Image (tube, rainbow, N blue to C red):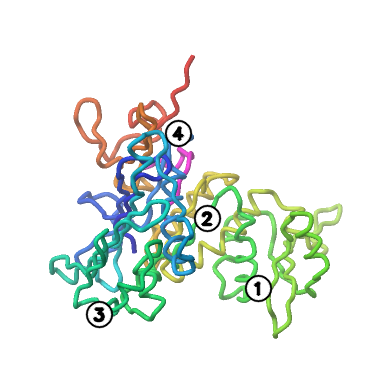
Amino acid sequence: MILEFTVGNFLSFSEKRTLSFEAKGISELKENVIRSKKYKLLRSAVVYGANSSGKSNLLKALYRMKDMLLLSVKLNDSEKLDYSPFLLSTEAEQSPTFFEIIFLHEYTKYRYGFEYNLTEIVNEWLYRAQDSRKEEALFVRTSEGIGVSNKFNEGEGKESVTNDNRLFVSLVAQLGGTISKKILELFRTYNILSGLENKDYNGFTTRMLHSQSEGTNESFSLFKKLKLGFNDIQIAESEFNHLESRDNIIKGLKPKNSSAIVAGAPVSLIFKTVHSKYDKKGNVIGTVLLDKHENESEGTNKIIDLSGPIFDTLSLGKILIIDELDAKIHPLITTHIVKLFNNPETNTNNAQLLFATHDTNLLSTELFRRDQIWFTEKDDWEQTDLYSLYDFNLPDGTKVRNDSNLERNYIRGRYGAIPFITN
């Protein structure tokens, strides 16, 4: 579970900015809080802001950190790093990018981060805090070398074989390190999605639904509850057509159907929705199977595709990160998805949700606590600032009340982070 994520000198983020999942000492919506010994963490967080304010860049930063950790050991010595600094400052474009994450794993708090430029890892560090004890360094990497604590013996002897462009924790994990594997495992639990390109995770959802029966899969109950216009779904197997797949690749197209391996042979999974067929008196006389991609709306396709990552995250206690969650979806359905995470009865494994949106219908004290609502806004130098509603000070110096009309006040500009439209 994430406590904090900090990013600096990455895309529109020039200065370091921190997103926190640590719950503040406020009384509203206590069910939205996960309690883990002395820690109190939020089940979800939402980010608002004008277009080009940096919402997506915050989520991209989490993806970039994940990508670097999981792919680091595959780099050749001379390969360049994926370096995207803030380019509107002569100082920043020559400085390293900063990523740091604080998370809980089995009641132990870890703080891991690194700084890097185009050619090398400049700094890297890992700290641990167990129970109520103070934080202790497990290893620290600087330009002078890597210092390893005797409490991180899995890293001993590996300092000299770590290339300048590779992360030390990734190398140690690949060589069997126990603690270092926990760092990588955290990032493997991230489901990072685009709310605009839901076809990217259509295959995952189709395979998941195919492998589970209706009685054991929560996606089926979600479809029925939301009344999307169909009665059921049907996923059929057909022989995988290699020639068709080749033609799609040549044309630059993605195949509509998902491939899978069944009994050792590749098959194609065809997703159909089941609709009732009526006579002229309105009596149901049978059913009709419709192609999901061709006959269902963009919104319905997104909800179906999104159901896989949602319930994978909820059932395994993962972290779901979505940009533009509200795109193509009715506000009531988006609200229902958020409630699945905020409700401890449906989120029994302490999964977390982070998403960016423009849907102001969600700005309600009945859905979110003030510490769950975050804003991005650019200053006069086009740097992204990130702040929570809980920390925001009104013009008279007071804090936002928990009975405020959040949607109305946000649209009126009381909290900032809205477009400035000239007359």
Side (left or right) of 329 relative to 258? left
Sequence-wise, the earlier of marks 4 and 2 is 4
> Disc 4 versus disc 3: distance between alpha carbons?
47 Å
> Disc 1 versus disc 3: distance between alpha carbons?
44 Å
Which amino acid lies under the numbered mark 4 shown in the image of this protein? Ala
Confirm or deny contact between disc 2 and disc 1 (CB under 8 A): no
Sequence-wise, the earlier of marks 4 and 3 is 4
Which amino acid lies under the numbered mark 3 shown in the image of this protein? Asn
> Disc 3 versus disc 2: distance between alpha carbons?
36 Å
Rate crowding at label 4 as few (under 14), some (14 to 19) or many (20 or more) other CA atoms within 10 Å: some
The residue identified by callout 1 is: 210
The residue identified by callout 3 is: 153
Tag of residue 50 = 4
Return the x and y of residue 89 as percentages of the image width and height: 37, 34
The residue identified by callout 2 is: 193
Return the x and y of residue 5 as percentages of the image width and height: 33, 54
Which amino acid lies under the numbered mark 2 shown in the image of this protein? Leu
Q: 374 or 200, which is in the foreground?
A: 200
Residue 94 among magenta residues: no
Which amino acid lies under the numbered mark 1 shown in the image of this protein? His
Quarter of the view holding residue 119:
bottom left
Confirm or deny contact between disc 3 and disc 2 (CB under 8 A): no
Sequence-wise, the earlier of marks 3 and 2 is 3
- Which residue reaches farthest top? 423
Given this view, does label 2 or label 1 mark the residue nearer the observer? 2
> Disc 1 versus disc 4: distance between alpha carbons?
39 Å
Rate crowding at label 2 as few (under 14), some (14 to 19) or many (20 or more) other CA atoms within 10 Å: many
Side (left or right) of 147 relative to 77? left
Magenta stretch: give its range.
353-364
